[in-house]
């Protein structure tokens, strides 16, 4: 390197090197980049200085050659100057840049700070879209999940009440959601029940893989929103819409949600309108394909979408209530043209802090399928169904006390036309109405912190009464219930929450019925439930 | 819109398919600022970018993880009078983001909490003013625990819990970064 000297431009090389080492006010490059730039500049200036020195020492060099050399050096300097600008711009883009302060009086319409995870920190909360753990590969696409496993010992009524040990991978449900826009959101539930389904005998699978929900949510106003047509939950009661295992304390879902309301009652929905008319009163109104009084296998439906000739199982009966009456959601295979209407009003009265409840009604003008008939071959006419539900949930503020209560009743327009009253089976007859009621008390005890979670134990007791075979039987069957449809359930147990997203349950349930010999359906069960 | 429309709009929209649709949130940031500080004449943008020691301090005080590099903060001013802080944050509800805002007094107590946007199909009870009013007056010295000093909401359990945890973190941010 030549001895530093003042160049023709008046800039000394040492000044350039010093400025590059310490950084200038206008350049915020990091140390490595600064050193690289400094070397580039130093080399360039050295070349310029060298050319000038040669010219001074060799007056015999042609003016044209000197001018050409200097022009080339100037061009190279310009290129290096451009490169420095590019590096500066890249450096700025890599820094976190909060939104510029708005002009006085001008307020930003949307917050614009970008959340960037700290080094070594878990991904940002807004980016833990895959099960709350990892960033989603597609912006706006989120996956959640819930599931439950059950195990224990229970009496089998079909084995004269013999106690049998068992296990059930009850359900694993994936919850994909995708914000198409901030106000148009896709929601779905994909469910695998009882371990799923398979064809081969060695797989030992006889469960379900189904779409339990799939609709587009249009968020318009707080008092007016829409669910698009799709597979949707009937807005009836509480458990049918909120049924993740962390939301109830027993291993099995509450009894009223197992037959009177055949949870999960998902239907072909033609659309739902919902919102809040006041901050404390909400509504949901849904139109859907009607429930069906047809509980037989799917294959027995005819190509004409009607009940088959000969015997077929009812969808409504005095043992299972409405448990087999869900309409199919696929393939245009619904068995009647009738649409059902459901309206739910939810309330959280401000004068009773901690109280929430709802009252809902479901009405179908007809649940009988095309071609409905008795075992004697006589055609069955129509029968309407009206289902009403009222429930409440109360948390006494600043205590662990919790109370839940529910009442459900179904009314049938014409019991003479119900299949269960015309199927030659006198033990499953249905009266003009069926109903049930339950009351549950629980207490939340904090257990302290362990394994990163705040543990909580919730002992509970629930009493449920159901009468699925009230009087007023009609139809071709012999009349008179045998009491199997009058049931009392006593369920006592404890649910332990290591976090609100995980629950470990155990309960004992005693079942009484009016049938001879009793219900023989007691159970001692454990369960694991999760929701994230 | 007048109140009567809340009762007639649902049946009207069922009968008519021609109504225009406006996609809106509960409140924009600007609207929430005005609601929280109605006498303010300006909101000065004053974001916080955490230092590592601040992150550790916030997490220790609140018991909640800090998941972003900073916080969106505005200072509400009426002329030269400082009225308080306005912070915008977000949490995950059931599995979608809830945008919310917290207004703090200059002394660091909660003045008001507003839900800006709730995207879930169920559980919008966290936007209930009665539920949100529980946080008014809370400071970092309060436990802010569900079922202890904050009432739970049936049907919105995860949302209400996460919003409570978010506000707890906001109060810790005040102690560490804004005091």
Image: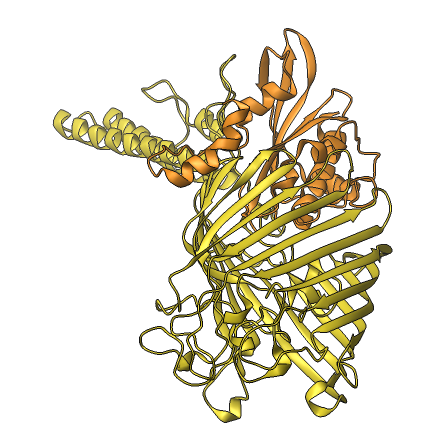
Q: Position of residue A243 (x, y in %)?
A: 63, 60
Could you tell whether A113 is left or right of B139 in the image?
left
Report whether residue A501 is seen: no
Q: Residue at x 63, y 50 (%)?
A: A121
Quarter of the figure with residue A324: bottom right
Q: Residue furthest top?
A: B79
Q: Is residue B60 above or below residue A466?
A: above
| Colour chain A is painted in | yellow
- The residue at the point 77 percent across, 57 percent down is A453
**Residue B7 in the figure: left or right of residue A301:** right
* Of A157 and A245, the residue lying toward us: A157
Q: Position of residue A305 (x, y in %)?
A: 35, 73
Q: Is residue B127 left or right of residue B25?
A: right
Q: Quadrant of the N terminus of chain A?
A: top left
Q: Give how far across and how far down residue B47 sits, in percent.
A: 60, 27
Quarter of the image where one finds residue B26: top right
Query: Is residue A370 at all visible to an observer of this figure?
Result: yes
Quadrant location of the C terminus of chain A in the rendered image? bottom right
Looking at the picture, tell me which residue is in the foreground, A415 or A366.
Answer: A415
Of the pair A453 and A423, the residue shown nearer to us: A423
Asked if residue A228 is positioned above or below residue A410 in the image, the reply reads above
| Number of disc labels | 0
Residue at 38% of width from left, 70% of height from top? Answer: A370
Question: Chain B drawn in what color?
Answer: orange
């Amino acid at each position: 390197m030549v001895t530093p000297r003042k160049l023709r431009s008046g800039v000394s090389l040492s000044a350039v090197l010093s400025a590059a080492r310490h950084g200038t006010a206008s350049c915020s490059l990091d140390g490595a980049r600064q050193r690289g730039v400094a070397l580039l500049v130093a080399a360039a200036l050295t070349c310029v200085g060298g050319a000038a020195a040669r010219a001074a020492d060799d007056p015999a060099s042609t003016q044209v050659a000197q001018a050409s050399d200097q022009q080339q050096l100037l061009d190279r300097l310009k290129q290096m100057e451009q490169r420095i600008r590019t590096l500066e711009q890249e450096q700025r883009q890599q820094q976190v840049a909060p939104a510029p302060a708005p002009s006085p009086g001008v307020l930003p319409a949307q917050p614009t700070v970008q959340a960037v995870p700290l080094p070594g920190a878990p991904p940002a909360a807004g980016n833990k879209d895959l099960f709350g753990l990892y960033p989603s590969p597609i912006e706006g696409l989120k996956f959640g999940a819930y599931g439950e496993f059950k195990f224990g010992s229970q009496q089998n009524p079909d084995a004269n009440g013999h106690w049998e040990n068992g296990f059930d991978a009850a359900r694993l449900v994936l919850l994909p959601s995708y914000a198409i826009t901030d106000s148009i959101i896709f929601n779905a539930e994909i469910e695998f029940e009882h371990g799923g389904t398979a064809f081969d005998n060695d797989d030992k699978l006889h469960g379900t893989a189904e779409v339990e929900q799939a609709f587009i949510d249009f968020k318009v106003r707080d008092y007016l929103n829409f669910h698009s047509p799709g597979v949707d939950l009937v807005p009836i009661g509480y458990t049918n819409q909120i049924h993740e295992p962390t939301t109830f304390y027993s291993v099995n879902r509450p009894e009223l949600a197992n037959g009177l309301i055949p949870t999960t009652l998902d239907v072909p929905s033609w659309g739902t309108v919902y919102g809040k008319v006041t901050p404390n009163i909400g509504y949901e109104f849904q139109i859907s394909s009607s429930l069906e009084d047809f509980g037989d296998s799917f294959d027995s439906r005819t190509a004409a979408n009607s009940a088959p000739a000969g015997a077929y199982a009812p969808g409504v009966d005095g043992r299972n209530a409405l448990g087999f009456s869900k309409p199919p959601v696929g393939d245009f295979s619904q068995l009647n043209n009738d649409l059902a209407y459901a309206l739910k009003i939810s309330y959280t009265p401000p004068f009773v802090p901690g109280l929430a409840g709802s009252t809902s009604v479901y009405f179908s003008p007809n649940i009988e399928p095309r071609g409905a008939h008795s075992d004697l071959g006589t055609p069955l006419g129509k029968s309407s169904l009206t289902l009403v539900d009222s429930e409440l949930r109360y948390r006494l503020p600043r205590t662990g006390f919790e109370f839940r209560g529910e009442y459900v009743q179904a009314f049938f327009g014409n019991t003479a036309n119900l299949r269960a009253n015309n199927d030659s089976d006198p033990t499953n007859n249905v009266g003009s109405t069926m109903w049930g009621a339950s009351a549950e008390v629980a207490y939340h005890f904090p257990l302290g912190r362990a394994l990163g979670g705040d543990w909580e134990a919730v002992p509970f007791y629930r009493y449920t009464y159901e009468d699925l075979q009230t009087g007023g039987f009609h139809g071709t069957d012999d009349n008179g219930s045998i009491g199997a449809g009058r049931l009392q359930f006593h369920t006592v147990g404890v649910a332990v929450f290591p976090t609100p997203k995980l629950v470990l349950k155990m309960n004992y349930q005693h079942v009484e019925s009016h049938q001879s010999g009793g219900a023989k359906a007691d159970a001692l069960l454990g369960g694991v439930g999760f929701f994230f | 819109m007048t109140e009567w429309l809340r009762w007639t709009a649902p049946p009207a929209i069922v009968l008519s398919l021609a109504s225009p649709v406006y996609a809106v949130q509960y409140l924009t940031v600007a609207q929430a600022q005005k609601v929280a500080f109605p006498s303010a004449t300006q909101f000065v943008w004053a974001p916080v970018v955490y230092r590592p020691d601040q992150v550790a301090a916030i997490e220790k005080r609140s018991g909640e993880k800090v998941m972003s590099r900073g916080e969106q903060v505005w200072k509400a001013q009426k002329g030269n009078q400082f009225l308080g802080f306005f912070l915008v944050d977000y949490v995950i509800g059931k599995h979608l983001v809830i945008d919310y805002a917290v207004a703090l007094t200059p002394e660091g107590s909660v003045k008001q909490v507003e839900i800006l946007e709730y995207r879930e199909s169920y559980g919008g009870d966290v936007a209930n003013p009665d539920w949100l009013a529980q946080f008014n007056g809370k400071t970092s010295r309060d436990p802010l625990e569900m079922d202890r000093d904050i009432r739970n909401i049936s049907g919105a359990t995860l949302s209400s819990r996460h919003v409570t945890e978010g506000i707890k973190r906001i109060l810790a941010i005040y102690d560490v970064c804004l005091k």
